[in-house]
Amino acid sequence: GAGVSQTPSNKVTEKGKYVELRCDPISGHTALYWYRQSLGQGPEFLIYFQGTGAADDSGLPNDRFFAVRPEGSVSTLKIQRTERGDSAVYLCASSLTRDRDSYTFGSGTRLTVV
Amino acid sequence: AQTVTQSQPEMSVQEAETVTLSCTYDTSESNYYLFWYKQPPSRQMILVIRQEAYKQQNATENRFSVNFQKAAKSFSLKISDSQLGDTAMYFCAFRPTSGAGSYQLTFGKGTKLSVIP
């Protein structure tokens, strides 16, 4: 696609529920990144995919968070047993591996846990 | 590890005037990139300007320019002839040019800029 697409745009869920956030990167971009932006903060790195594999998941806060990219394109960020502290905007970005200048962000998913 | 500090949570400027947003950073890396991103209410992070640390010349993009002081680890953004469409959050960000973290951006907390008609 022309840009990085994230769905849903907004998600409200109850504490304890499971949620999935989807990212559709720019066609041909082999690298994909997830960031979390809490209220009043800058985005913080969560995980980086190179192709299908997670090259660095050191930013995931705990084992309730998991992300996959099974075919090297679309990625899904999964959050189990959501907590109110998980409320944030989750941003996805993609880039060409050898051209970090192509780093492009989506518009994010605003997750609200009530 | 890198840190990026933006000490101005909010700023305002009259339309057509000039404003400067401040950013300082701390790193042990010798080669890196610095960025300013704009985040309007649409939430998408939009790249405004980029500076390569090995270049002494300050980057310029139309009305946007930077003052990069490598020794002081300072990277300010100047917006000239401010327009209403410049109203947004502005984030300073850092990325090493090589190594394990070269794909990862480290952001400051942002400055909310309001352009007043």
Image (cartoon, coloured by chain):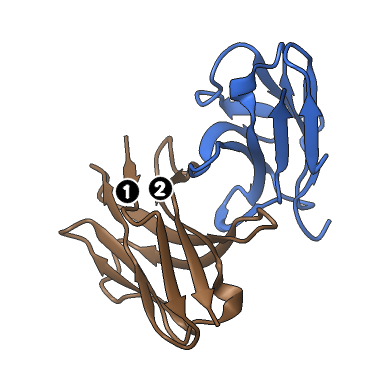
Q: Which residue is mark 2?
A: B108
| Res. A6 image quadrant | top right
Where A38 sits versus A68, above or below? below
Which chain is in blue here? A
Residue A24 seen anywhere in this rendered image of the structure? yes
| Residue at screen point 59% across, 78% down | B84
**CB of mark 2 within 8 Å of CB of mark 1?**
yes
Return the residue nearer the eye: B73 or B87.
Answer: B87
Which image quarter is the C terminus of chain A in? top right
Q: Amino acid at mark 1?
A: Thr
Give percent across and percent down for residue A11. Answer: 79, 33
Where A52 sits versus B72, above or below? above
Give percent across and percent down for residue B90. Answer: 48, 60
Residue B5, disc:
1
Q: Colour of chain B?
A: brown
Where B103 sits versus A1, above or below? above
Label 1 marks which chain's residue? Answer: B
Which image quarter is the N terminus of chain A in? bottom right
Residue A16, disc:
none
Q: Are marks 2 and 1 on the same chain?
A: yes
Return the residue nearer the eye: B38 or A29.
Answer: B38
Say what secondary structure mark 1 lies in.
strand
